Amino acid sequence: MADKVPDRLSWAAEVVAPGPADRILEIGCGHGVLLSLLADRLTSGTITALDRSDKMVAAATKRNAPHIASGKAVIRQAELSAADFKGRLFDKIVAVRVNVFWMDPARELAAVRRLLEPSGLFYLFFDPPSPTQAEPIAAKLTANLESNGFRVLRKAFTVIGAGKGVCVVAEPS
């Protein structure tokens, strides 16, 4: 689409850097912008996107019609903890601005662990309204991940407009 891609999503796509055969799950896909950026990099890989909102699923479906038609993308209306993937596992799981992960994420993180390949990676992105909130949010995400069966591999930060973007990358421990 011709509209401008938000800097936070361009940065997220660069950090995730999918390989051509990756199997990716995006949690909370919204309008499907990051989904488009990631699907553009896949050849034999696939991306499955979830959102709880019918409106967001409709918008993401419209935006990604070519990727859906090619078999690279599937978009589902579902909550993560209730979604059934019939034993399918993912190489990378991505969530941008999904607040449950820095609040009370035990149920959702259990679902992520269940859906992630043993060597897979989980990417959590946030862009807090104030740059001073970036480090505390990264610390909270790290604590939540480590207390729910993950090992944090790295934290990344970037300038996004007047704010600061946060990414925490983890693997199952």
Image (tube, grey):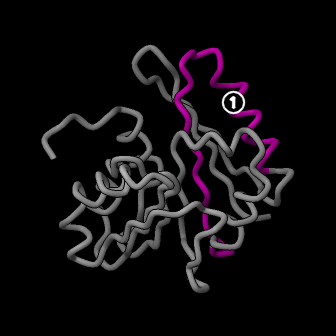
Place residue 7 in its image quadrant.
top left
Identity of the residue drawn at 44% across and 44% down:
12
Identity of the residue drawn at 62% across and 39% down:
99
100 lies above or below 72: above
**Per the image, is 119 magenta?**
yes
107 lies above or below 134: below
Identity of the residue drawn at 54% across and 50% down:
95
- In the picture of the structure, the residue carrying the numbered disc 1 is 137
Q: Which residues are magenta?
A: 117-145
**Residue found at the far left of this picture:** 2
Q: Nearer the viewer, residue 35 or 76?
A: 76
How many marks are shown on the rendered structure?
1
Q: Nearer the viewer, residue 72 or 77?
A: 77
Identity of the residue drawn at 21% across and 65% down:
65
Is disc 1 placed on a helix, strand or loop? helix
**Per the image, is 74 magenta?**
no
Q: Is residue 151 left or right of residue 21?
A: right
Q: Is residue 62 left or right of residue 167?
A: left
Q: Is residue 27 left or right of residue 9?
A: right
Image coordinates of residue 167 in percent, x first then y, are 58, 40
Quadrant location of the C terminus?
Answer: bottom right
**Residue found at the far right of this picture:** 147
Place residue 91 in its image quadrant.
bottom right
Q: Dot 1: within a 10 Å radius of its alpha carbon, few (fewer than 14), some, or many (20 or more) residues?
A: some
Query: Type of residue at label 1?
Result: Ile
Image coordinates of residue 80 in percent, x first then y, are 60, 62
**Residue found at the far front of this picture:** 54
